[in-house]
Amino acid sequence: MIKITNLQKRYRKAKSFALQDVNLGINQGMYGLLGANGAGKTTLINILTTMSPKTSGEIIVNDILYEPGNYPAIRKSIGYVPQEFGMFPNMRIDEIMDYFRILNAVPQLEGSERIKNLLEYLNLSQHADKKFKHLSGGMKRRLSIGLALINDPKIIIADEPTTGVDPNERINIRNLLLDLAETKTVIMSTHIIEDISYTCKELAVLSTGKLMFSGSIGNLLNKYAGFAWEYKTKDENETENIRKQMLVTNIMRENDGIILRILGKDIDIDGAKRIPLSLEDAFILLEGG
Amino acid sequence: MKRGAASLRLMMYSSLLSAKQPLFIISVLVIVFITLNNANSLFKMPYESKVQYEEKLGYIKYEDFINMTFTEFDSLYFDKFGEHIKQEYSFLTYIDKMSVEQRTMLEYDKVKSTDKYDAYFNEMINCKYIQNVQRYTFFELKNLSKEQYDLLSHSLFTPGFSSSALYFQNNSNYSSIVLEYPTYSEMLEIIKKENMSYHIAREYYFRLMIPLSLLLIILIVDRFSKDYKYNSELNLYMCNVKGSRYIFANYFGILFPFIIASFIISNTWAFIYVANVNASIWVYSALDFVKAFFLFPFSSLIYISAVALLCVMLMKSSMLSLAITFYYSFIFSNITYNPDGTTEWQISWLNYFPRLPFRYGIMNDFKAEVMIHQLAFLLIAVVIVIISGRIWERRRNHCGELI
């Protein structure tokens, strides 16, 4: 669905590349885009959504070659859920949906039916007459997903869709995106590893503009299999020494001692035992830990 | 065809949305207020019958007054105020000496009895130009008033002046008053070409231009800065809509409801006025107000709103866009003043509406130029809107660069 080859991006007046030699193939299903702040996720999304031109490389989106003349066609096949979403405060949900239907030139008959279905799907039907200013953060985020779907695009790009919403709403949004991934390509950019681990089979990890990994989560975990350790001690000094010498990702103090979570290929501590590697551990190792 | 229909649908929808906005509703209320306020002066005009006016046209004939010697005027003054005037005294000396009642009496008698000169004299009494004339003696001032008839032009809306004008029109023996003024027969020729109501309508819309412009600028800047203010631009950029179509539809979506509201409201008062006016004296037609609306405010409003649109597209900031467009609309809508205080009436390519003199002699002088001016500004407005569409499109393709 999306094929990226040797993509490079350098902002004007910038010395370094924001994206360097990125090669990706994204197919139908849920795809995670993981990276720390400033890793290049937003730059990649901006390029895919035609909001920022690429410096070099080739992109094919839905069999359309990425070039300025094809931007309208690319936009037509992409639905974008931005991180920050706002709308005129006095507009009602149904008005906003209808406005975007007209902006997207969706015929009224087809569009009205789609809006009705979308509102039901997004669990917003009963709030259709609510003004935007009266919506909660989660409702706004769901509305934003609805707007991205109004054109019935084949690709959905969601930029940090779960940031700033309560846990229940986070689960709702994740489930919504998962449902969509049944028939569409859904790219979810986030730095919340939990969201990726619960929803995506495949992911790409970016760090300072470079692609560190792309493939299935299983492959990533296999790559660092046996790198996670747990060690229990009662000695505070020892804990401090281990912290200084090794990559400790968690320290849990309990009544009978201190449990350390350590990452490393081979660690030289008696009594340390291997534990299953989490996606977060793999990400930290990938990032250079 | 399909694209046109889509644009039209978008424009209709934007119009409906704009019309529902609280700011638009407030604007409509303000239009009602300002049009009513301006129409008020029209309502005051020849409401009374010709006979009533003639009764009011006092006992001192203009010819008598203009040829009055100092002694004769002194005698008149003595009759009124019980004291003699001194030739060496400045005009202000007399004004200062008079009580409010005395001034009113003098003013009242003059307005009812004579012609344009008296109206100008009343302006002097009202101290509008007192700084410039306080050094003159009474007779110097009298001569000055004859030379500076321009300053009187706006006074046609005052009841006093309109009654004088009626008197002027209905007494053809006054044709020899002063050579530089049109004679009665000349004025009749002018009025034959254009109804009096056309000239009144023109003045009416000149007065409405600035408040209408300011309201429209606020609406345009508010609408387009909202896209950025409420972070909705990213969603909008991803829509399957061309920049030019988006800008055209939203721009006209505000402009058309505003112009329709202005047209209906301003013309309602005008129609009421025309329906009630004493048509036996002047020729009045409601159609003149419609004609004047499309000749003057229509294209000027389109132009100034396009300037506001361009500002908000370039700057995003609503306050900065408002400040620049307000500044432009004020600077290039005012009459320019000559160093001697007289006004200079001319069409300038920078002035977004041609503010013409309301003077009998040159009522028709600029008609062709006005048409060209307004058409040119309409075309410039279209070009500005197209440029704004391009700016929006460019911003859409490069907005990621700014994040």
Image (cartoon, grey):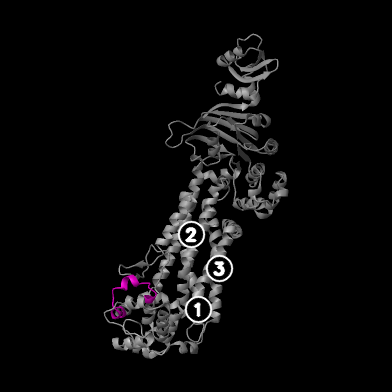
Q: Position of residue A236 (x, y in %)?
A: 62, 14
Of the 4 image quadrants, the one containing the N terminus of chain B is bottom right
Q: Magenta residues, as a range?
A: B123-142
Q: Quadrant of residue A80?
A: top right
Q: Residues within 10 Å of mark 1 (few under 14, many from 20)?
A: some
Nearer to the camera, A53 or B289:
B289
Residue placed most toward the observer, B325 or A173:
B325
> Label 3 belongs to which residue?
B32
Q: Give the vertical position of B180 relative to A6 (above or below).
A: below
User: Which amino acid is tagged 3?
Assistant: Val
> Mark 2 and mark 3: span between their CA atoms?
20 Å
Q: For mark 1, what is the residue?
A: B44
Q: Could you tell me how far apart the alpha carbons at marks 1 and 3 are, in whole angstroms?
A: 18 Å
Q: Residue at 43% across / 87% down in the picture?
A: B57
Q: Nearer the viewer, mark 1 or mark 3?
A: 1
Q: Is residue A173 left or right of residue B61?
A: right
Q: Which residue is mark 2?
A: B305
Q: Amino acid at mark 2?
A: Ser
Predominant secondary structure in magenta?
Answer: helix
Residue B387 seen in render:
no
Relative to B155, residue B399 above or below: above
Q: Amino acid at mark 1?
A: Lys
Task: Tell me the distance, in whole angstroms, between the alpha carbons under discs 2 and 1.
Answer: 33 Å
Say if B133 sits above or below B24 in the image. below
Which structural element holds mark 1?
helix
* Pointer 2 or 1: first along the chain: 1
Rendering quarter of residue B380 = bottom left
From the viewer's side, name the closer residue of A70 and B241.
B241
Crowd class of label 3 (few under 14; some 14 to 19; many from 20; radius 10 Å): some
Residue B199 part of the magenta segment: no
Vertical side of B216 occupied by B265: above or below? below
Quick check: A217 left or right of A64? right
